[in-house]
Amino acid sequence: MTEKNTSIQITEGVIWKQLLFFFFPILLGTFFQQMYNTVDTIIVGRFVGTQALAAVGSTSSLVNLINGFFIGLSTGSSVVISQYFGANDREGVRRSMGTGVVLSIVLGILAVSVGIGGSPDLLRLIKTPESCLEDAITYATIYFCGAAATVIYNMGSGILRAMGDSKRPLYFLIITCFSNIALDLVFVVLLKLGIAGAALATVLAQVISAVLVVRALCRLPEDIRLNFSHIQIDTMLLKRILLIGLPAGLQFITFDLSNLLVQSGINSFGEVTTAAWAAFAKADGLTWMVSGAFGVSITTFVGQNFGAQKYDRIRKSVWTCLGMSLATQLLISCFTLVFRVFILGIFTTDAEVIRVGAYAMLWIVPFNALFMFVEVFAGTMRGVCCSALPTAITSICICCFRVLWMILIVSRWHTIEMLCIVYPLSWILAAVVFVTVYLRGTWLKKRIEACGMKPEIR
């Protein structure tokens, strides 16, 4: 018996309505994903203490670096599948899915190995405060035991979204979120397992999400369902997937390596600032939930329409998505700034941590909307299999710029202000370059020619 088919094609209809229809389940799903990660921070900060909160915060860049690379590699599958789905090629969808699942299993195993083996040295490399180093190593080591489940879930949910189904990944994350909350309360509050309990709760929640998404893929309509007898590598499709996924994975690496350097700078200010930054990152989480949801939405939207060869619809959807995302981010930034002290107080009761976090937010949050230029234009280019270009722009304008800033500026003027301002400056630079490249239009023309599609009529 199969579940009801919730997949949709987004190659017809009113663009803004379909973007919102697709966007909101992704946003809510991201909210619940962020929520079950945030629960660790809240419970650790309130029931274990500031030192433990700093330990969790100091691992965030490392976790994003390792998970991000392997998840980025797997995103190529969703782009390829969305194009086959838009072109109504069911055999292509099925073969891409089988190849993607094999790839996610291999990448998941690698993520576990790299995460567990590399965490201690990397945490020392980024100057994690000695007072919380042992706790940070414990948290990271346990957390990465569930890295394979994380990769499999993200691959599976990406496949479902590529076929227009953004609802079931949301349902799975809701279940996972409440499972994580319950497990956190049991392991940390009742059993007093401390930071190890918080990490263990997250691992078990990740396993639940992976099981749910694999089950959903196995219960799709017969012509596109995941059949274990068909799980095998198609070398041609693997090449296409990696041509998209590898640049995305490398972007995660360069992005997070620059953030690791920034985290090292944060750690150099001491335990209070490290804890404050961890609380700030969680308090500002809604911004990046919205950002990521719009990015995923436009990538899938463009992918299906590129497969259907509806180029004018692609261009219209980009400006529609950009306008909606900018308006949404400006509203969120205003809300976050007004209530920043209250929001930070959710994560910690330490007055000094709240003061430092609130001050840092004044330097960064007003400029958050600038990142939407990066998210929307990069997502658009990836939707047509143009993955290397946005990776190059992001790596140079954001990552390399931040590295140079930390080395040349922050090392000389060691202040919170100089540390914070690197974020808006890098977003401005990247936004200018992305707008310029997008308006030139050669990125789309080259992909149309490379795929042998009918030329764009303008």
Image (cartoon, rainbow, N blue to C red):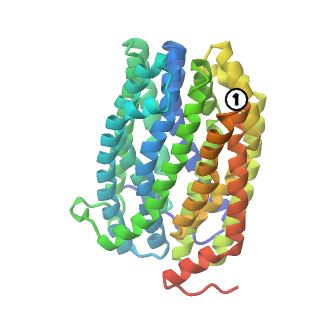
Q: Report the residue at 50% width, 39% height from top.
A: 33
Question: Badge 1 local density, few (<14 within 10 Å), some, or many (20+)?
Answer: some
Position of residue 319 relative to residue 371, above or below, is: below
Residue at (39, 41) in percent of width and height: 209
Q: Where, by quadrant of the figure, is residue 191 drawn? A: top left
* Up/down of 332 relative to 137, above or below: below
Q: In the picture provided, is 176 more to the left or to the right than 327?
A: left
Q: Which residue is drawn at 52% across and 25% down?
A: 41
Under mark 1, the amino acid is: Ile
Front in this rendered view, residue 339 or 227: 339
Displayed quadrant of residue 367:
top right
- Asked if one can make out residue 143 in the rendered structure from this viewpoint, the answer is no
Left or right side of 83 for 25: right
Which residue is at 50% across, 45% downward? 170
Above or below: residue 307 compared with residue 347: below
Indicate the position of residue 122 as horizontal and vertical percent values: 42, 35
Q: Please, what secondary structure does the residue beneath circle 1 have?
A: helix
